[in-house]
Image (tube, rainbow, N blue to C red):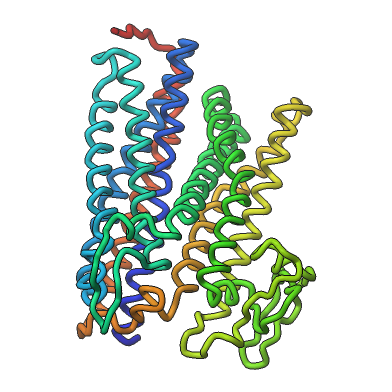
Amino acid sequence: MDDFIAARSQMALSLGFHIIFSCIGMVMPFFMAVSHYLYLKTNNITYRNITHAWTKGVAIFFATGAVSGTVLSFELGLLWPKFMEHAGPIFGMPFSLEGTAFFIEAIALGFYLYGWDRFNKWFHWFTGVVVGISGLASGILVVAANAWMNSPAGFDYIDGQYLNIDPIAAMFNDAWFSQALHMCIAAFVATGFAVAGVHALMILKKQSVDFHTKSFRIAAIFGTIAAILQPLSGDISAKFVAKNQPAKLAAMEAHFHTEKNAPLIIGGIPNTETGEVKYALKIPGALSFMAHGDFNAEVIGLDQIPKENQPPIAITHYAFQIMVGIGMLLMAVSFAYFIALWKKKNWLTKNWLLKLFVFSTPLGFIAVEAGWTVTEVGRQPWIIKDVMRTIDAVTPMPGIIYSFYMFTAVYISLSIIVVFMLYRQIKMVPQLYDLPKTIDDKP
């Protein structure tokens, strides 16, 4: 493994782990705030217990997200100094604002964790809402920085120099809205189905059924609504990519030949040598319509992209197919759940519905990882689209492979610790939250 591959692998590993921690950290506070609100409105002790349990999960993921995010910030400077030398002054604003949002989140979380029975009950609840809003803002700001790499703005590139820098224009680049919307909804889908799946498993095991049933419903409603909305954000993203990153779209769809009435390819194995996709289902005109709103519109293929500027086609295509396939599956589960809520109440207690959610537990995060693979691999060979190549931004540092091995061990260890802590929290539910308690809430 050469230094270039080691640097990219280490960054991919760090992002792959951090994105899971950050998604949960962005979304779980909203679950926590909803259960807390239901407790305040109903005075049902179970909702208070759910809130306490989820609060501990929020604290765990806040800590791990802070650690993994800090590592990423160091890696940007250490592994990609040429990139940060030029890009830092341009897209540094969203990163600095993200730091501000992080500190607000930390302060609000501190108030929330230690504010039980000390603050006014509604102010205490509000601090939990602030945790969620600031966490979501952090995610949007980081995605805005990444979107700038896909759609550079806020500067003039003249004779190798970055001039007339406008940080506001860089932050609100053309890609930020579509990427932020898609990522935020994806975070709600992934976290909602993961949390609902864990509680569904506990219901199937007949453990603390009332506690887990109420928890399941909150998480499932968030996850299923987001899953139904996700294709809309996906359509917005696809239209942007078609207009601004035709090479990425061509790789996503394994679209080798420029043509009108371009077919949408579902599945298939792309052959880069022959320019064919075997074993694929093709829907005539669908790609033209989805990309440009016209069944006869021309869609640029890989034949118009110079070989040296083409992304890795197979990886991008397979990752895109995984993301879309899982999205469609989770949307189907979501429709089944809403049918159960509105028309078929007896389905809510059926094992098959709960098993669907248990099966879906990891799928949202697999789709998130696949989606980020499409975003990052599909932009290659550019780290800043059409401005700086990835290979020109890496540190020529010997021995970087050992850094990769070290960080791999760190992230695997961190993940094992997080899983152990969450498992212990779930096992402690009967002892901590099933017993009736006397509560004296002070205003």
Q: Return the x and y of residue 380 as percentages of the image width and height.
A: 44, 78
Quadrant containing the N terminus is bottom left
Where's residue 214, x and y in %? 55, 25
Q: What's the residue at 30%, 54% (across, down)?
A: 168
- For the residue pair 186 and 58, the one nearer the viewer reads as 186
Q: Image quadrant for the C terminus?
A: top left
Return the x and y of residue 422 as percentages of the image width and height. 40, 42
Task: Please say whether residue 72 is visible from this viewpoint.
Answer: no
Q: Residue at x 23, y 72 (%)?
A: 163
Q: In the figure, is residue 341 to the left or right of 232?
A: right
- Left-right relation of 427 to 258: left
Q: Name the residue located 42 percent from the left edge and 45 percent from the top edge.
A: 24
In the image, 212 versus 148, the foreground residue is: 148
Quadrant hosting residue 343: top right
Q: Residue furthest bottom?
A: 273
Q: Where's residue 222, x and y in %?
A: 55, 36
